[in-house]
Image: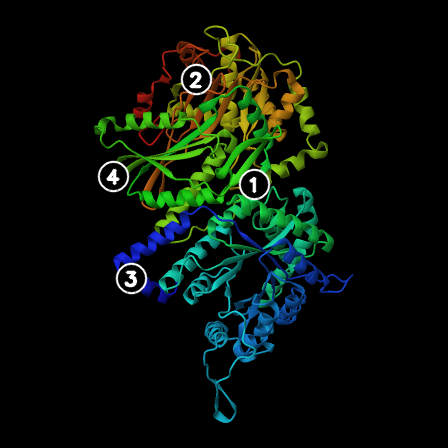
């Protein structure tokens, strides 16, 4: 904010401040309204036809199709926008060619023009058009432009703000004095008188917060763009603009925020992106060259290309209307939620002009569709991993077993309202957190909208005796994790449980359709990063979020054309002739219809055993994952009497994904391992290293593709290729954020999607783990016995890796199984409290 705005806000009485706050909050809470759509011109330089035919023809088309306005810029001495040196000349032509569409300059560089000439020119156009003009005033960017007014460059911003006031007064017919010849004063009268009594004025603000604030102070509208700012930064700037309007006596709801976006639509989103790749890169090259010219100095060619690659990737996927009518809704939804009122579609950035005309028809369809339904909502195909999960969920609903839950213990002076604001901010960034699922004509789809704001659900257990609060919160989290999600809302919820004034617990529950464990890490990191910024009065500054649907589409493209055939062949060869997936000895027969109720049994290893495991892993050039897995396979071989075993283990599948992507990206890997009783544990480690390394090298194949090839008759079985799952994870140490200490928190939903999952955590104080198991299949005694066997064999193997697998002891005097309360006492209350 500027100093003036701060002073005005400080001068408000408490009642006035409360009324202003309520008004702004009310506006922010309103459902996103339908956006206006306009056409914007900037860069067309086609040489195979008259230069301005496209402008005139498509302006007439916009007039017929009900677009709000057509915008033309002012640019000088550069091929980038060089067809538009004078928007008033072109607007006069547009006024005669159209009947209804509004005619706007976007932007007129005001320091280059005398206010009287601005008013005279545009009053003529207002008369020609029947009162349809509007002007967006810019301060100017390029020093070369000011060859037209060299003395106006240094103080161009101040000149612009002063001149806006003068232009408005002249337009209204008020007296304004100007210096005349020989020291005289001239008070001119504007002719012809304009049709509109007040000139619609915009201020062009490319991302500078001060420009948004100034527009609010002036009571003007705003013209902006997403080159140079993310939708989140734009939302913060719009909030500044609305607050400044209110603080200076203007209706905060009345101003129009217009955002220019590159726009090209095709019925096929992939075809649209392919067609736009070259012209958009060249457009961005021109933009980067302009930036270079502004700051001076040459770029190295490699630097230019690297910047261009980055700019193209970010802009084309996150901040441009490039795709199909069914894929652009999420960006429109984010902009509507941010407070944007009008989308100015830049249509002449180098795509073939006949294709651009077709695109305008599709843009009109989007315009009319969202106008009929209110907040924009789009549909998109499911991701590859989502498809299988959706099909299984419909055939054999797993309910809460298919939810993923995580959480944090929060110690310190938490500002719950700031955390709530941070949650809404992160929810607005990521499409996955605004996605529901539906079926249309038998095809499952994602539905992504803007009318869902994540809010904290708040619970309080301070009425419970202090010694019982942790247990009470544990039960609350379990109930929270098991509560079904309604079909018509995104499957995500967040709870804050208050145990004391400076002691809270956070529980986050998501359906697996929209998340994996890495996504949880990204979510929590962004949540508390935004919390820190908001607590300090700053706008959260996070890199743009990539939509999951865009990643899913690229993943399909990577799989087309046999790109994964070699990897699929590896798995076919690896699993050829494999036995039925291994599982634990069952208490009875497997029911015909799978159930998913589950329990957990915990294990704890000493610091000494953990140190030995890590030392053996380093010596044998394997990971701790591989060492513990080898002992687990040896244990299951002993328990079941089988020597050829297939277990599952997920991999993150994020080699090609942006770091901050939220969504389902897991690839379950079926690991087939054959250990011989006579081989040493050291030899077994070498075999396991080969198996797991080959699996990771071929891990991009979607699990569904493996099922289709290897077990098509079991396609609707949750566990066609493996029934037991193994994970080895790092337990995060507590971290400090804004005066808070955040510690990982485990929640037991009392479910099990698999027969069993063996999870181990490598902790600085000693490894620990659990077996989550289907309580309808296995007796607890069987699971506890398996824990003792596994832990005893692992302890012996890392003590003497030259022991033969068949000679590893299966029982001993040391007890490894612990109950929940004992685990908490042994590990300390910063570790899992479920």
Farthest residue in the bottom direction?
A: 182
Residue identifier under label 4: 501
Residue 351: percent from left, percent from top: 70, 54
Instruction: From this view, report whether residue 191 is shown above or below residue 638.
Output: below
Which one is earlier in the sequence, the residue at label 4 or at label 1? 1
Farthest residue in the right direction?
A: 48
Dot 3 lies on which element?
A: loop
Residue identifier under label 1: 378
| Residue at image coords 70%, 53% | 357
Report how far apart the C-alphas of labels 3 and 1 lie in the structure.
42 Å
Camera-nearest residue between 751 and 300:
751
Dot 1 lies on which element?
A: strand
Camera-nearest residue between 482 and 831:
482
Residue 813: percent from left, percent from top: 36, 11
- Tell us which disc is closer to us: 3 or 4: 3
Residue identifier under label 2: 597
Camera-nearest residue between 440 and 458:
440
Q: Quadrant of residue 785?
A: top left
How many marks on residues? Answer: 4
Instruction: From this view, report whether residue 543 is shown above or below residue 251.
Output: above
Dot 2 lies on which element?
A: loop
Q: Quadrant of residue 404?
A: top left
Report how far apart the C-alphas of labels 3 and 4 lie in the structure.
32 Å
Q: Residues within 10 Å of mark 4 (few under 14, many from 20)?
A: few
Residue 12: numbered disc: 3
Which one is earlier in the sequence, the residue at label 4 or at label 2? 4
Residue 29: percent from left, percent from top: 40, 47
| Residue at image coords 38%, 50% | 26
Tell me if 466 is positioned left or right of 801 in this view: left
- Tell us which disc is closer to us: 4 or 1: 1
| Residue at image coords 44%, 34% | 492
């Amino acid at each position: 904010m500027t100093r003036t705005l701060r002073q005005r806000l400080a001068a408000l009485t408490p009642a006035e401040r409360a009324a202003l706050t309520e008004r702004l909050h009310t506006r922010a809470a309103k459902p996103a309204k339908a956006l206006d759509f306009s056409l914007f011109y900037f860069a067309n330089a086609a040489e195979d036809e008259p230069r301005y035919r496209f402008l005139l023809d498509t302006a007439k088309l916009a007039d017929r199709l009900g677009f709000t306005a057509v915008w033309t810029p002012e640019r000088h001495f550069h091929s980038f926008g060089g067809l538009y040196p004078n928007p008033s000349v072109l607007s006069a032509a547009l006024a005669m060619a159209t009947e209804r569409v509004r005619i706007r300059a976007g932007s007129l560089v005001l320091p280059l023009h005398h206010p009287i000439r601005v008013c005279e020119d545009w009053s003529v156009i207002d008369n020609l058009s029947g009162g349809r003009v509007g002007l967006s005033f810019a301060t100017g960017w390029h020093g070369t432009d000011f060859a037209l007014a060299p003395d106006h460059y240094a103080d161009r911003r101040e000149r612009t703000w002063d001149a806006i006031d003068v232009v408005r007064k002249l337009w209204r017919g008020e007296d304004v004095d100007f210096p005349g010849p020989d020291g005289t004063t001239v008070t001119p009268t504007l002719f012809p008188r304009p049709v509109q009594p007040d000139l619609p004025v915009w201020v062009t603000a490319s991302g500078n917060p001060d420009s948004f604030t100034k527009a609010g102070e002036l009571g003007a509208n705003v013209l902006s763009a997403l080159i140079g700012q993310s939708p989140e930064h734009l939302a913060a700037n719009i909030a500044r603009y609305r607050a400044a309007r209110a603080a200076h006596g203007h209706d905060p709801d009345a101003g129009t925020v217009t955002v220019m976006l590159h726009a090209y639509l095709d019925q096929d989103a992939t075809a649209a992106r392919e067609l736009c790749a070259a012209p958009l890169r060249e457009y961005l090259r021109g933009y980067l060259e302009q930036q270079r010219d502004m700051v001076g100095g040459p770029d190295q060619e490699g630097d230019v290309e690297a910047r261009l690659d980055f700019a193209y990737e970010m802009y084309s996927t996150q901040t441009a209307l490039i795709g199909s009518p069914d894929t652009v809704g999420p960006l429109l939804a984010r902009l509507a939620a941010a407070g944007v009122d009008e989308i100015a579609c830049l249509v002449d950035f180098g795509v073939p002009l006949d294709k651009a005309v077709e695109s305008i028809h599709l843009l009109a369809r989007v315009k009319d569709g969202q106008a009929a339904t209110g907040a924009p909502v789009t549909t998109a195909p499911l991701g590859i991993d989502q498809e299988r999960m959706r099909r299984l969920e419909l055939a054999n609903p797993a309910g809460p077993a298919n939810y993923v839950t995580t959480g944090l213990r929060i110690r310190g002076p938490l500002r719950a309202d700031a955390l709530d604001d941070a949650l809404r901010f992160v929810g607005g960034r990521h499409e996955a957190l605004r996605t529901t699922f539906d079926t249309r004509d038998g095809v499952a789809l994602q539905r992504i909208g803007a009318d869902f704001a994540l809010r904290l659900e708040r619970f309080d257990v301070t009425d419970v005796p202090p010694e019982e609060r942790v247990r009470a919160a544990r039960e609350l989290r379990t109930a929270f994790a098991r509560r079904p999600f309604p079909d018509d809302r995104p499957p995500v919820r967040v709870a804050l449980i208050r145990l004391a004034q400076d002691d809270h617990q956070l529980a986050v529950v998501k359906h697996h359709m929209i998340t994996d464990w890495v996504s949880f890490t990204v979510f929590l990191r962004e949540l508390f990063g935004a919390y820190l910024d908001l607590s300090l009065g700053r706008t959260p500054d996070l890199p743009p979020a990539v939509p999951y649907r865009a990643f899913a589409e690229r993943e399909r493209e990577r799989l087309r054309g046999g790109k994964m055939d070699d990897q699929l062949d590896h798995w076919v060869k690896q699993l050829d002739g494999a036995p039925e997936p291994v599982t634990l000895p069952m208490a009875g027969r497997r029911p015909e219809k799978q159930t998913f109720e589950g329990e957990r049994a915990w294990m704890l290893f000493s610091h000494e055993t953990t140190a030995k495991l890590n030392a053996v892993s380093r010596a044998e050039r394997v990971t701790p994952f591989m060492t513990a897995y080898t002992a687990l396979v040896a244990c299951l071989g002993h328990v079941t009497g089988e020597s050829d075993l297939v277990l599952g283990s997920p991999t993150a599948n994020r080699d090609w994904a942006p770091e901050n992507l939220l969504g389902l990206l897991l690839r379950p890997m079926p690991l087939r391992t054959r250990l011989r009783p006579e081989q040493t544990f050291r030899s077994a480690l070498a075999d396991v290293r080969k198996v797991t390394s080959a699996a990771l090298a071929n891990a991009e194949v979607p699990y569904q593709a493996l099922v289709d090839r290897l077990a098509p008759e079991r396609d609707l079985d949750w566990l066609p290729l493996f029934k037991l799952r193994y994970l080895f994870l790092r337990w995060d140490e507590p971290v400090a954020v804004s005066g808070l200490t955040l510690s990982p928190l485990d929640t037991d939903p009392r479910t099990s999607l698999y027969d069993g999952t063996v999870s181990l955590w490598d902790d600085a104080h000693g490894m620990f783990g659990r077996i989550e198991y289907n309580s309808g299949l296995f007796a607890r005694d069987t699971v506890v016995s398996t824990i003792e066997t596994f832990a005893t064999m692992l302890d012996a193997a890392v003590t003497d890796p030259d022991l033969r697998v068949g000679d590893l002891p299966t029982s001993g005097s040391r007890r490894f199984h612990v109950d929940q309360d004992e685990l908490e006492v042994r590990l300390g209350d910063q570790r899992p409290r479920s």
